[in-house]
Amino acid sequence: MRQAVNAVLRRDLRVETRTPQVVPGMALFSISAFVVFHFALQQRSVEGNLAAGVLWVTLLLAAVLGIARQFVADREEGGFEGFLLAPVDRTAMLVAKAASLFIFLVALELVAVPAFLLMLLGPSPVEVWRLLLALLLADLGIAFVGTLVGALAVQSRARDLLVPLLALPLLVPLLIGAVKLSAPVFGGPVAAARWPWVLALYDLVFGLVAYAVFDFLLED
Amino acid sequence: MYGTRLRALSIATLLTLAGGFALAAFYAPEDADQGFMQKILYLHVPMAIVALCGFVFGAVCAIQHLRTGASRWDLRSYVAIHMSLIFGAGVLVTGSIWARASWGHWWVWDEPTLVSFLIVFLLYATYQPLRFSIEDRDKQSRYASVFAITAGAFVPLNFLAVRLAQTYTHPRVFATTDGGLEPRMKLAFYVCLLGMALLYATLWKYEMASKNTSAQIKALRRRLAGDEPPGPRRSAAPKLESA
């Protein structure tokens, strides 16, 4: 199992490092989104709840871009067949894909969050650990839900249409938690202490759901 | 034979629903604050409860489908979600009317139940496009089941998150569905809830009977005329193997 996960994960990372496609795409998208937000909101800087909202909407939409690309190569270049022929547990595919999506999201945030702080944020951030915790928990959740949604949509003709339609409603609870958790960093009101737990519960539930149903997405 | 006992079920539904609405209109007292408008409660809340239970029922059928691989479970799950979507549209419309009457706006964001319901509705609205866009039948039903299970797990989580997100809630007539209800109102409400559940069951059975019967007719026709190429599909409903 560990070997198979390693193999698939290393392959995905190698593909991405040789021809960088997903991470630069997501990063560029997030910076364009900040520019769009600047003009759409007609503000030089944002703070508080508005800042948290701008950051998380951007990250979520950028993540949707990554989710849509996740399984495309496997489908088009025969990666699924190769994986199914190998005598390994199919859950390895889920773990590897979720891990690679997680790594891509972290790479995206290494660009997008500093860019946000420089370009849009008014007050200097305080209690940055809240933002880091929110990013960690949200990335985990997006990795599981995204892998499930990506695998669901990749076999359909309307893939690019279905991914955002499926992913955005599913990610709404996660967005609520992430925004609540990170608003104080940008000068917003401090939310109740339960939000990290809600996010953790979300990650746990969708991790288990993905584990339970993912096998059925890989048959034949 | 399909659709047995449909007549009895239909009559029971009609009687219970009519009785429930009559109780709601004439027996239950008018609300002191909202007056007659509050009576939409007897339509809106049962419909919402039944729609959500229908989504969960769809998820349970989907689990059965993945376990057994029998296409009749896929059909059950499909029809359950289809019916719940129709009920869900009704819930959103009646909820919006109620919001307009009691708070003066067609849509209020600080009503957590209605907002969660909208998110759930939006998610399930992708169920049919997903089915339509996967050509391979076998794959289509498996993927639809995976979706139904994921969405079924999402429903309670979503309600939890949206409810917690409200820093304050609007003053409401009743704290929970039966918390502050007067006994006569409670009786009318439960009869309406039963009637709505019966309505859901009846419509579900009708749809199942129709789907099964048309599959059977198609099979018979094919046997009469020899194999004919299938026409263009107009529905993403699962096809049953003909007996």
Image (cartoon, coloured by chain):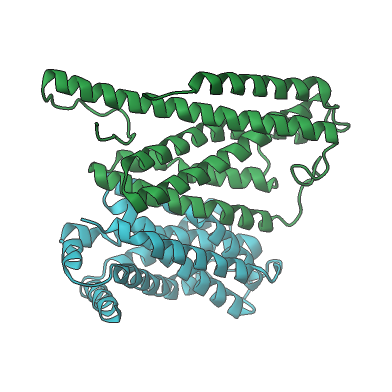
Chain colours: A cyan, B green
Horizontal arrangement in the rendering, residue A40 relative to residue B179 (left or right): left
Q: Nearer the viewer, residue A148 or B215?
A: B215
Vertical relation: A193 (above or below) A59: below
- Which residue is at 32% across, 72% downward? A96
Vertical relation: B143 (above or below) A140: above
How far across and down, in percent of the image, does residue B110 sit? 70, 47
One can see residue B160 in this view: yes
Which residue occupies the extreme right position in the image?
A: B32
Vertical relation: A12 (above or below) B162: below
Q: Nearer the viewer, residue A67 or A122?
A: A67
- Which residue is at 59% across, 80% downward? A129
- Which residue is at 81% across, 32% downward? B185
How far across and down, in percent of the image, does residue B173 sit? 81, 40
Quarter-wise, where is residue B179 in the image?
top right
How far across and down, in percent of the image, does residue B210 sit? 38, 24
Quarter-wise, where is residue B92 in the image?
top right
One can see residue B94 in this view: no
User: How many numbered circles does the render carry?
Assistant: 0
* Viewport quadrant of the N terminus of chain B: top left
Quarter-wise, where is residue A66 in the image?
bottom left
How far across and down, in percent of the image, does residue B160 sit? 63, 56
